Amino acid sequence: MLMFNDLSIKHKLTGIIMSACSLMLLLTCAVFVVNDLICFRREMIHNISTLASVIGVNSTAALTFQYPETATEILEGLSAEPYIIAAYIYTDHGEVFAEYINNELSMTSPTTRSCVEPHSYKQGKKFFAPGQESYCFSCNCMSLVKPIILNGKKIGSVYIRTELKGLYSTLKRSVSIVFCIFIGFFFLAYLISSKLQKIISDPISTLAQTMKNVSSQKNFSIRIENKSKDEIGILIDGFNKMLRQIQAHEKKLNEQQGELEKQVAMRTAELKVSEQQKKQLSLQKKSQRAYGELLSLINSIDISQILERSLNRIVMQVNARWGGVYLCREEGKLLPKTTFSSNKGDGDDKKQEIPLRQRAQKFAEQVFNKQHLLMSESVVLPGKQDEYFPPVAVGYPLMFQKKCLGVLVLIADGKSNSEDKNFLENTTRQLSIALHNALTFQELQYKSAQLEQSNQELARASQMKSDFLANMSHELRTPLNAIIGFSEVLTDKYFGELNETQEEYIGDILESGKHLLSLINDILDLSKIEAGKMEFSPSDIEIKSLLSTSLNMIREKAVKHSIKLSIDVDGIPEIIQADERKVKQIVFNLLSNAIKFTPDSGKIQLNAEVVDRQCLQNNVPALFRDEVFSAMEKDKSSYIKVSVTDTGIGIKPESLKKVFEVFLQEESPLSRKHNGTGLGLSLCKKFLKLHKGTIWVESRLGEGSTFSFVLPVESDNRQ
């Protein structure tokens, strides 16, 4: 785990994606192998059971008239089955009537010799249910017993034992195929994850490298180009804004330093040559020089460097014995200890630093509470002599925009002169600004780390969702197709007549299977669109024929419910360019919804016409107008408008836009009678977006609805 934490973000993203993909592939492969094994066992049981039934039917005469030679000849027919080890026919009393043993198989395969030993039917009764077909598996073979029935009465039993070489060879072949598929998909997932992780890792790596360059070079003119508007883009904008503020502050400090140097030069020329004036001038120069040096020392975003450099310079400038800075906590209290301190003096003075700090802590709290300059004439500890301690303590609150960031405490031998006071006032003001910039930069770094972690979790969740939807949809469609196919075979009565209850149950299975398969297909299409993997293949299609064919697909159901169908497509061109499969699915979804929610004896009309933009502006409802024209291409003037009108239940006004959202359906007593996924209209809208078209609905509750969509007439729609 420690090694993983030290990896770069691109390797972390790749590792997370690969771990998720590997887990899903392993689970899928395991399900495939187990399913293959179960299916082969069922087929093997079915084949042996069928063989036993044939032998039983052919042996009824031999058992009835006691001809064991005939029964033995029937069993000898099993020599054509190479995997049959032995077979026995028993009388109704459990005695062996005839037997067959594959001597060649028992001699060539040592593992099956134990399976050829004579079988005791009475002993086997505790393993096999009497009077009915039974089977069991051992490590090397499978045994099956099937009763022989004549005129509803059991007259004997057939026992067959076969080896399991075929089962094991099938299992080995399945494992080999699954392993090759796993290796192939593993490398494919690695290539894809290596490409996709750059979307997240590159901007964060650029930001980290830029922060490192700014910190090492102290060059605040560097900027990062923002190429996105997500959280990373916001972070980059904030970082650039902070650099501009620091750069502006640095420029202001340089201007102030230049101004101070000009003032020093002007004042020097005006001063009289006197001892007091020389001393005053010297103090001013020293203070201004110290102030200029201090400005250059605090030009950093590292709090440790700012406090260490500035405190040492301040203590040296004002000739203080001790100085300390107490920073403020987030909850508005001072830290219990000094963040940085500086002690000037000999060894005896340094011995006094511990009790000095205890007193300075209380003094700093007083300054913090009052938030203005305080001066103490004496600093005395109980039980100590006054001469051990400096007599004057001064506390300056470090304020920025009416917020106290900390307190500067200085202890000196005497009161400061006016130049030192001016120096301290200017210094604390600039030190407050520098501390604010440094704290802001630390907060930005912390938020950057949080944002990076959130992006990693979002990317992993999105990838897992897409992989899950795609894999599960494909895995579920295979057994569903089998269920639907077998149900249709039974419905068509290929294997005999069905009673009324059987037909009803099989019809329910077929309808439910088709509904579930439609849901899975819709989910798969939706996941492909969201992942950007949906194929869009425009070609020349015969639109009139497509619309007529779609209407014919629902005609049988309409006749069943006495619903009248009509179509009017005379005014449209014969051929347009579009994706035929997607347009057909759009029309079929709209017609299916119309017939689903239209009561018996209702009407459904399918219309198509050529319209221009002006016509659409006059006829599209105001609720959809902005959405419709933002989706269509501005350079196209002609469109085909297809409308499906019904006399159904209608839609509430507040639900007109919601029906196009994923997994949402209009609630009504009639809609609850029909199965629905809530994906049909959402897929229609997404398919039309690929064509640079759009869809809308007009409806009145209780009177019916009209769903309309438009497609460009002349367009080389490309994804």
Image (cartoon, helix red, strand yellow):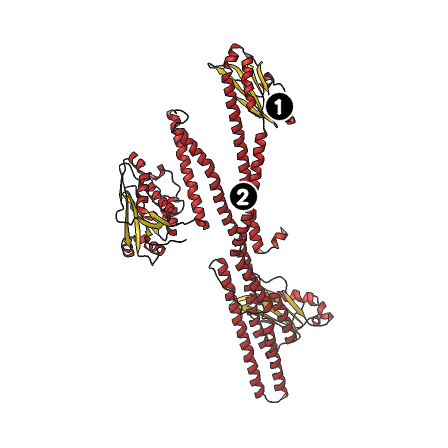
Question: To which residue does mark 2 refer?
Answer: 24
Q: Can residue 562 be seen in this view?
A: yes
Q: Distance between the residues labelled 2 and 1?
A: 46 Å
Q: In this view, does 402 lie to the left or right of 565?
A: right
**Horizontal placement of 524 versus 436: left or right?**
left
* Amino acid type of the residue tagged 1 in the rendering: Glu
Residue 482, image x, y percentages: 45, 34
Q: Which of marks 2 and 1 is nearer the N terminus?
A: 2
Horizontally, is 697 left or right of 505 in the view? left
Q: Quadrant of residue 335?
A: bottom right
Please tell me whether residue 135 is drawn above or below residue 9 in the rendered image: above
Q: Mark 1 points at which residue?
A: 104
Q: Residue at x 48, y 61 (%)?
A: 227
Q: Give the quadrant of residue 425.
A: bottom right
Tell me residue 153's x, y (percent).
48, 14
**Residue 1 horizontal/vertical position (percent):** 62, 50
